[in-house]
Image (cartoon, helix red, strand yellow):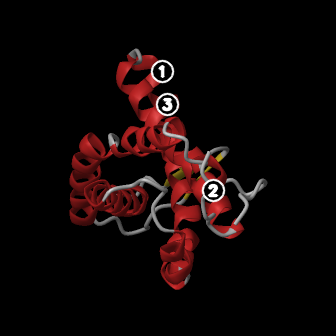
Amino acid sequence: MSAQKAYTVVASYYHWLVAAPLMGSVASVLICQQSPKEEKGKWMFRHKSLGLLTGLIVAPRLGYRIFASAKYRSVGHPTGTGPIEGKLADVSHLALYGFMTIMPATGIAMGYYGGKGLPFFWTTIDGSSVPNGDIAKRSFSIHKTLGTYGKFLIPIHVGGAMKHSLTGNAIWSRVNPFGRPMH
């Protein structure tokens, strides 16, 4: 295995803290789509709760990513990554950041401006006392379209990590907040 530079511990924690609810939210809506009518409500409540949690975590993650951009760039691509593969990785990462930011934002806007509120595990946070159907409708359109295609970014990301792992790169330790690779 070749040695790899690691992301900061903070970046590693953010990676996993966002990954869990993001994947859970996507899984919940996919399960909902295949569920009988009487079960759809509980799966959508889970989807919305996990989506809101994703949004709450992705906001500081995005801020950290912007302010610590030099630290991210210094990690670079794994050993053996060619220029085309590196550009494809950069594009897929940028798209995944867009997905994990825009999806919660549009979901939150739908719930808030639609007036129904924001489901959050054991409660529902109130929506706007003056609903705005135009904002809710536009948010729904963006959310549905991006969700249809954006969900494929997650297996692309995981597949890229698996590829690097299978080619001998210590890719998992780059984002492991507990075990840091040797420099």
How far is mark 1 from mark 3, CA to CA?
A: 7 Å
Name the residue type under label 1. Answer: Glu
Residues marked 1 and 2 touching at CB (< 8 Å): no
Q: Is residue 65 left or right of residue 12?
A: left
Q: Nearer the viewer, mark 2 or mark 3?
A: 2
Q: Is residue 118 left or right of residue 86?
A: right
Is the residue 155 above or below the residue 179 in the image? above
Residues marked 1 and 3 touching at CB (< 8 Å): yes
How far from the left and from the top, in percent, is residue 180? 74, 58
Q: Is residue 4 left or right of residue 100?
A: right
Mark 1 highlights which residue?
A: 39
Give residue 3's mark.
2
Residue name at image x 40 percent, y 62 percent? 97
Is the residue 65 above or below the residue 118 in the image? below
How far from the left and from the top, in percent, is residue 133? 25, 61
How far from the left and from the top, in percent, is residue 44? 46, 36
Mark 3 highlights which residue?
A: 43
How far is mark 1 from mark 2, CA to CA?
A: 47 Å
Quadrant the C terminus occupies: bottom right
